[in-house]
Image (tube, rainbow, N blue to C red):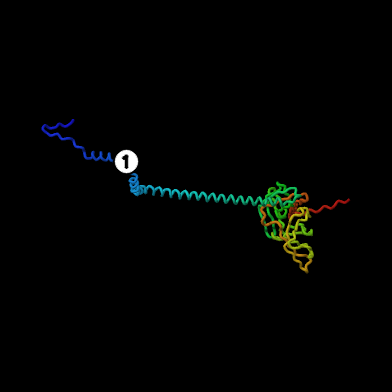
Amino acid sequence: MPALREPGARYAPPRVSTLGLRALVLIGLSIGLMVADHRQQGLALIRSGLSAAAWPLQMLVHSPVAAWDWVSSSTRTRHELLTENEALRNTARENDLKLLRLEAIEQENERLRKLVNAAPRDAERVQAATVLRVDLDRLRHRVLIDRGARDGVTRGQPVIDASGIVGQTTNVGPMAAEVILLSDPTHAVPVQVERNGLRTIAVGTGDSERLTLPYLPRNADVQVDDLLVSSGLGGVFPAGLPVARIAEVRRDPSQPLAIVNARPAAALDRDREVLLLWSKARVALPEAEPPPPPVAAHEPRPKPRPAAKP
């Protein structure tokens, strides 16, 4: 309700507030500036200057957030790099192992290929075998292979490698067989010199790198580097298989026999795979007969019966 004017008081018009007047002036000025900037682009330079002046303040306000983001990103990136490096190392180790296995398989395939190619053409059958155990004592050169009677192996079976004769089987079990090597002191093989056909016998010496030919006369026609091959005599080894190569020939005028040593063609102390041969010319050796049972000391020995008279 408007206030009542007192009787006798003079009338005064209402005054405009100073703040309101300022507001009106500023509003009008703003409208004028916007219209001028829209039509003539007159304030672009002023805006650019104000933006440049406010840039340091904006960077100062934003720097804590940017610093925190950088620290977080660096920490995460380092952790990711460490994890990735570890994964790459593991992958590299696995690849190295696979490469080693692949190289081993390739070498094994190459050895088996050479073994098959080394088999004589007249062989009825061949079979690869793996060496399980090696016994290279001075007086006993034997190896154990993973083939036995169930695979058709018999006593006296020829055994070769990619370079020549290794030996022959002796004791044959159901699952494995023992092979006596050429270098065994008790082993001998009939050989002949490939150059001239001279026949002789090569005997083991207990040294895997040396065979001896003890039965050659002093004037025998043998030379260093002559190749010795199997002669085929004896019915064990097929003829023509490499046995050894002559490494030394000594002729002493005071001795009737020459001293001839040869180096085996086969890698007797390094073979991992060997080849078993079946051939028509091979004669199977009879199995060793068991010794007679011992007779007790207190038991009288039986007397032989006299032959019946006709």
From the viewer's perspective, is 7 left or right of 287? left
Q: Position of residue 258 (x, y in %)?
A: 77, 65
The type of residue carrying mark 1 is Ala
* Residue linked to disc 1: 36
In the displayed orientation, state which residue is furthest to the front: 40
Residue in view at x 14 percent, y 34 percent:
11
* Position of the N terminus by quadrant: top left
Q: Is residue 270 left or right of residue 80?
A: right
- What is the x, y in percent for residue 249? 74, 64
Q: Is residue 83 left or right of residue 197?
A: left
Residue 167 at x, y percent in the picture: 72, 55
Q: x, y (%) of residue 204? A: 72, 59
Residue 169 appears in view? no
In the current view of this chain or complex, which residue is farthest to the left? Answer: 8
- From the viewer's side, name the closer residue of 99 and 148: 99
Q: Quadrant of residue 186?
A: bottom right
- Give the farthest residue toward the right: 310
Residue 3 in view here: yes
Which is more toward the observer, 213 or 108?
A: 108
The mark tally for this picture is 1
The residue at the far bottom in this view is: 254
Residue depicted at x 14% and y 32%? 5
